């Protein structure tokens, strides 16, 4: 599964590369957009540098040298591109999860329907079985009654033959 995930991420990066290039060109053309990207990149650089200095255990806070505007612009567009890649990846994962959940829900509903159908059939078979048991009892009662009638007729016949 991991190689497929890496391949998917690589494909998404390839497909988003033109978008990142367009963003970079837009940043060059629109000064307001450029200033937003540069500010974001400078903040990222500051937080990244600060977290690294804490990680490596520098005792006193270090003075962070700001990036040049071109470096900040490059970093900002790279960050925007990576955010785009991860956003699309997260969206695809979420869509796949929702699709899988819907399929699981459909399977569960189908299973519940099949169980209900089987329970209904079992109930119907139970009713038929009870009816057949009642009919069998009635037929046995009639059979015993006929046997009794046959015995009485036979005894009458034998008695009439003996007397006659």
Image (cartoon, rainbow, N blue to C red):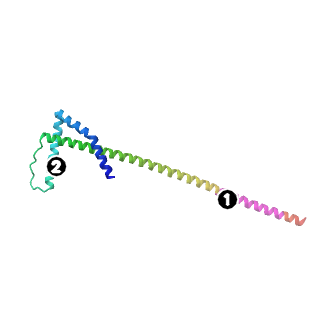
Which quadrant would the C terminus be assigned to in this image? bottom right
**Image quadrant assignment for residue 99:** top left
* Real-space CA distance between mark 2 and mark 1, rounded to the nearest whole angstrom: 89 Å
Q: Residue at x 17, y 35 (%)?
A: 28
Find residue 111 and report its horizontal and vertical position in percent: 47, 51
Q: Main secondary structure of the magenta part?
A: helix
Q: Nearer the viewer, residue 112 or 28?
A: 28
Tag 2 and tag 1, C-beta contact below 8 Å: no
Q: Please give the name of the residue rendered at 15% of the width and 52% of the height, measured from the top-left corner.
A: 52
**Image quadrant of residue 26?**
top left
Quick one: label 1, few (<14), some, or many (20+) residues within 10 Å? few
Mark 2 vs mark 1: give the one in front: 2
Residue with the most extreme bottom position: 162
The image quadrant of residue 24 is top left
From the viewer's perspective, tell me whether residue 28 is left or right of residue 111. left
- Numbered badge on residue 120: none
Image coordinates for residue 57, horizontal then vertical, percent? 13, 57
Image vertical order of residue 33 relative to residue 3, above or below: above
Disc 2 marks which residue? Answer: 48
Q: Residue at x 85, y 65 (%)?
A: 158
Mark 2 falls on what kind of element?
helix
Query: Is 61 on the left-hand or right-hand side of 11?
Result: left
**Magenta stretch containing residue 94, yes or no?**
no
> How many marks overall?
2
Please rate how many residues cluster around mark 2, counting C-alpha atoms within 10 Å: few if below 14, some from 14 to 19, many from 20.
Answer: few
Report the residue at 11% width, 41% height from top: 68
Kind of element beneath mark 1: helix
Residue 17 x/y as whole percent: 25, 40
* Marks 2 and 1, the one that precedes in the sequence: 2
Task: Give the residues drawn in magenta, as a range.
Answer: 133-156
Q: What residue sits right under mark 1 in the picture?
A: 137
């Amino acid at each position: 599964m991991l190689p497929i995930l890496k391949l998917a991420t690589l494909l998404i990066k390839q497909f988003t590369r033109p978008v990142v290039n367009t963003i970079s060109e837009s940043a060059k053309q629109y000064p307001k957009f450029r200033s937003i990207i540069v500010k974001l990149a400078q903040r990222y650089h500051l937080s990244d540098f600060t977290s690294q200095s804490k990680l490596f255990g520098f005792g006193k806070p270090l003075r962070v040298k700001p990036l040049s505007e071109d470096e900040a612009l490059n970093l900002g567009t790279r960050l925007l591109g990576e955010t785009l890649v991860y956003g699309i990846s997260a969206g695809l994962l979420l869509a796949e999860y929702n699709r899988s959940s819907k399929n699981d829900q459909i399977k569960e509903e189908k299973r519940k329907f099949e169980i209900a159908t089987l329970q209904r059939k079992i109930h119907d078979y139970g009713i038929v079985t009870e009816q057949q048991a009642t009919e069998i009892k009635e037929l046995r009662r009639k059979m015993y009654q006929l046997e009794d009638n046959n015995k009485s007729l036979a005894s009458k016949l034998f008695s009439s033959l003996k007397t006659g």
